[in-house]
């Protein structure tokens, strides 16, 4: 189990790790909160977006931590009252970056670029460096990379796999880097009938049941954005029936919504995501 392996590695260095006790971190990035928690730095956290916390980080809903608003609706007054020395954010808060910067220095932990693991490692190092916890980060990353190699080995004979995002009853292609880059699952080629759509500055690739039947994956992994943000969740049984009517019967696996849509990019969330995928794919006949 990757999470337990990382925890064991951290126990070896946590007693001697030096941290900056004067640091006060407010974070809108749940992946960074996840990493701070894994590195034993919860005492430096002063503010989090409580309404969006996934279950495994629910301890940060305690009164000890200030509620700094939503991921797309920062509470500037509460944030200022928390008196942070550093505000961690991502592109979700881009519209408020100037206002946030008036309260405290900023650290953008958006995972960008073509190499997901390289960006992930850099984020962990940067966050740990802010708090003089580099030894914790080195131990955690070493354990994580060992687990990545082991799980890649377990998935060498994985079934053909398609990752989709559910949003408001619609499905979209999701070439998720944890699945395809970190774990090495081959991304399936799209038929000519599947075409991307540009909406504003973003590009989406809608997938109908007929398109999925044409792609013909053995497994469909579903990231349910609707469920993650509190909207109507996907109906897995209905999805299976719809796909069957279109002429295909893949194994449909519903991934943990908040883990995949809200808190990805953290030491714990990456470990949990890998465990979910490996559990789903390594046990397929």
Image (cartoon, grey):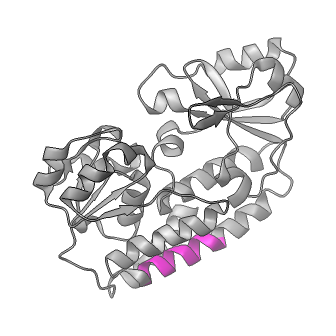
Q: In the figure, residue 190 lies in which quadrant?
A: top right
Image quarter of residue 204: top right
Return the residue nearer the eye: 80 or 97. 97
Q: Nearer the viewer, residue 34 or 154?
A: 34
Query: Which residue of the protein is positioned furthest toward the top in this rendering?
Result: 245
Q: Is residue 249 among the parts visible in the rendering? A: no
Comparing 139 with 25, the one in front is 25
Is residue 120 visible in the rendered structure shown here?
A: yes
- Above or below, comparing residue 134 to residue 239 in the picture: below
Residue 166, percent from left and from top = 60, 27
**Residue 197 rendering spot, x and y as whole percentages:** 69, 28
Residue extending furthest left? 81
Above/below status of 54 relative to 103: above
- Could you tell me which residue is drawn at 84 percent across and 34 percent down? 217
Q: Is residue 207 left or right of residue 193?
A: left
* Residue 133 horizontal/vertical position (percent): 36, 80
Q: Does residue 48 sit above or below 15 in this rendering?
A: above
User: What range is drawn magenta here?
Assistant: 135-146
Most common secondary structure along the magenta stretch: helix
Q: Which residue shows up at 46% across the image and 43% down it? A: 262
Direction from residue 47 to residue 217 in the image, left or right: right
Figure label count: 0
Horizontal placement of 276 versus 103: left or right? right
Q: Percent from the top left, x then y, of residue 163?
A: 70, 38
Residue 157 magenta: no
Q: Name the residue: 85% across, 23% down.
A: 213
Q: Assign the N terminus to one quadrant of the image.
A: bottom right
Q: Quadrant of residue 247?
A: top right
139 in the magenta segment: yes
For the C terminus, which image quadrant?
Answer: top right
């Amino acid at each position: 189990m990757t999470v337990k392996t990382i925890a064991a590695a951290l126990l070896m260095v946590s007693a001697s790790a030096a941290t900056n006790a004067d640091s006060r971190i407010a974070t809108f990035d749940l992946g960074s909160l996840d990493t701070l928690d894994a590195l034993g730095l919860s005492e430096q956290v002063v503010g989090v977006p409580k309404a969006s916390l996934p279950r495994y980080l629910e301890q940060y809903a305690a009164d000890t931590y200030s509620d700094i608003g939503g991921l797309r609706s920062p509470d500037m007054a509460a944030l200022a009252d928390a008196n942070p020395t550093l505000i961690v954010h991502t592109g979700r808060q881009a519209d408020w970056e100037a206002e946030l910067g008036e309260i405290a220095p900023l650290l953008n932990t958006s995972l960008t670029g073509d190499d997901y693991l390289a960006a992930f490692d850099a984020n962990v190092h940067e966050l740990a460096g802010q708090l003089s916890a580099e030894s914790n980060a080195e131990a955690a990353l070493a354990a994580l990379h060992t687990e990545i190699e082991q799980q890649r080995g377990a998935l060498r004979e994985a079934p053909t796999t398609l990752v989709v995002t559910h949003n408001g009853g619609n499905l979209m292609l999701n070439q998720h880097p944890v699945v395809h880059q970190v774990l090495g699952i081959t991304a399936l080629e799209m038929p000519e009938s599947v075409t991307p759509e540009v909406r504003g500055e973003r590009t989406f690739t809608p997938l109908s049941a007929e398109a999925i039947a044409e792609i013909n994956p053995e497994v469909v992994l579903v990231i349910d954005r609707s469920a993650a943000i509190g909207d109507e969740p996907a109906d897995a049984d209905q999805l299976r029936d719809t796909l069957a009517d279109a002429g295909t019967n893949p194994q449909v696996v519903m991934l943990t919504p908040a883990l995949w849509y809200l808190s990805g990019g953290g030491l714990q969330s990456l470990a949990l995501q890998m465990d979910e995928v490996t559990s789903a794919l390594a046990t397929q006949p």
